Amino acid sequence: MKKIIQILLLSTVFMTSSAFAKDTIIPLEDNSTILGKWKVTAEAPARHKTKTPLNIHWDFKSDGSLDTTAKDARNRTGSMSVTVKYSIEDGAIKKQMKPGSEKYETCKVVDQDDKTMVLHCKYLYFFLERE
């Protein structure tokens, strides 16, 4: 009986630690793999948490600008567009928090292929699909 309890405890610890394992960061050498238009489909406070659907479009340009267009999900205000600066530093994306501000947010790529990308920013994960 004692051995069964120990095995159950160890398996619980193992399963819990693997479920909340740290993300594998995919370092960016330059902006070549992120250039172009992306649709931000969802955001979540953690990868395994419930995702909130979004209707945002990001266009990473080669000149270091990121055009963002967001559409109101309830269609009350239409859409809003802003352009912020971004750069690649230490393998991560550093993007302006808002236009004209010198505050930057660091977003790390934690999953990427030809059509999708997952970014982990300070407080949120963003799930993107290439347009």
Image: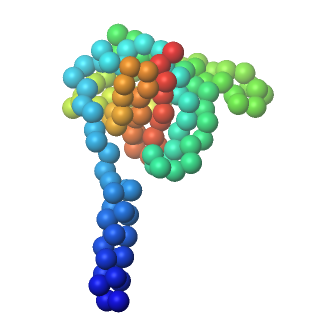
Identify the residue at horizontal 37%, vertical 70% (top origin).
12
- Closer to the camera, 89 or 8? 8
Who's the residue at 40% across and 39% down the image? 121
Q: At 28% across and 42% down in the image, what residue appears?
A: 24
Q: Work out whether 32 lies above or below 5.
A: above
For the point 34% across and 82% down, which residue is it? 4
Instruction: Return the residue nearer the eye: 48 or 106.
Output: 48
Q: Position of residue 65 (x, y in %)?
A: 40, 16
- Is 95 rendered above or below residue 2? above
Horizontal and vertical percent position of residue 71: 66, 24
Q: Quadrant of residue 125?
A: top left
Residue 66 seen in the figure: no
Q: Is residue 73 left or right of residue 107?
A: right
How are the colours assigned in the image? rainbow
Q: Is residue 75 left or right of residue 37?
A: right
Q: Is residue 115 above or below residue 94?
A: above
Q: Where is residue 3, by image quadrant?
A: bottom left
